[in-house]
Amino acid sequence: MGFSAKRKRVVFVTRRMVMGGIEKALISMLESMQKDEYDITVLVMGRGGELIDEIPNHVKVKCLYGNEKSIIEKIWNYTKRGNFINAFRIGWYTVLAKKAKTVYEQEMYQSKMLPIAETEYDLAIAYHTPASFPVVYVMNNIKAKVKAAWIHSDISQYERELQSYKNFYRRYDRIFCVSKFAMNKFVEVYPDLKGKASVFYNILDQKRLNLMSVKDEGFNDKFDGIRILTVGRLTSQKGQDIIPSILMKLKSKNYNIKWYCIGDGESRSKLESMIKKYDLEEYLVLLGTKNNPYPYIKQCDIYVQPSRHEGYCITLAEARAFNKPIVTTDFVGAREQIENGQDGLITKFDENEIYSAMENLISNKALCDKFRSNLNRKSVNTTAEINKIYDCLS
């Protein structure tokens, strides 16, 4: 038996490698795993995405829908090979999926359309939001000795959709949750699965973040005031839509500030309209997606996380790693990262509360120094979490 045959086979199933916290956390995990010990595959639902090239070279990346660019091409390829049963199956379930009345029903047909994976794995992981196709695919289409599902978010936000997935979660061997609060929310919805659930913090490598923070330039606009930064996809969940009205109030006090947002998403056009409406073009800068946001995090003066809901929030952890004075909303997992009043400020998702907290930091240098000092004493390094993966395979 050759050396490679002894390696444990691990597969992660996710959607697309777009710029997001889930995808960044996955890359950190892949980088942490010992490549000599594990044969790792990532199955994606869709090709592309800003982070696809960040996946380590030793990891195999495959599209679970195959290499064909369309269903027609897939059917034709099976037909040419004389595999009429598969060709018919794909056509039939594609039609049913298009007629499905719910996303869950559509996913069930998609699962039936796809073949059972040929490789048998030691560990298969559904690595996406709790109510999504990877949860179905790992259970129905992959053979593995151990199957684990990842909970990245506050599942009370998905409670209605999750009812359909209940029987899938009951069949998983392990349920990993990215924070204690995320686990508690999961157990509230699925009390009978308490024994399977455990916390697995997103892997953060402090050494790597420091190296990345000096790799690229960062801010280049010569601004000499207070730089405020928010990082995350531009979506309702992340709460950037509350920024313009808060910034208007702060500007009315004549503070020398500029607020930058890194990320892109469906809320961009709405934000651009608000920036124009409030004449904030000079003061609220949408930087777009940055593959390396760490120079900006290192160089900013205050970090703000205005999310409506999160599971753990990896960007908040990254801001902590650079000892930044932080204002964050009180989402699931925030209090596991920030001690309110000691190393950051936690507020409700409320315009006036966020404004007051930010004004406090902007006008109180001693408070900022206190937060930096206290954060500097804490370790954010979570590389040891990878041992929980190894435990699944022992």
Image (spheres, rainbow, N blue to C red):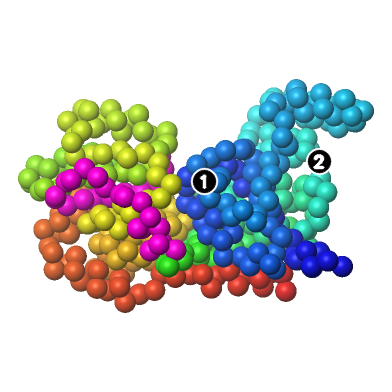
Between 235 and 163, which is closer to the camera in this rendering?
235
Between 350 and 141, which is closer to the camera in this rendering?
141
Farthest residue in the bottom direction?
377
* Residue 297 drawn above or below residue 343: above
Q: Element under label 1?
A: loop
Q: How many marks?
A: 2
Farthest residue in the right direction?
82
The residue depicted at 83 percent of the width and 66 percent of the height is: 2
Figure quadrant of the C terminus: bottom right
What's the magenta region? 208-237
In the image, residue 57 lies at what x, y percent?
A: 61, 53
Tell me the amino acid under the disc marked 2. Answer: Pro
Horizontally, residue 185 falls left or right of residue 46, namely: left
Task: Judge the density around disc 1: few (<14), some (14-19), many (≥20) Cα neighbours within 10 Å.
Answer: some
Badge 1 is on which residue?
51
Badge 2 is on which residue?
115
Can residue 257 be seen here? yes
Q: Element under label 2?
A: loop
In the image, residue 67 lies at what x, y percent?
A: 72, 35
The residue depicted at 9 percent of the width and 42 percent of the height is: 252
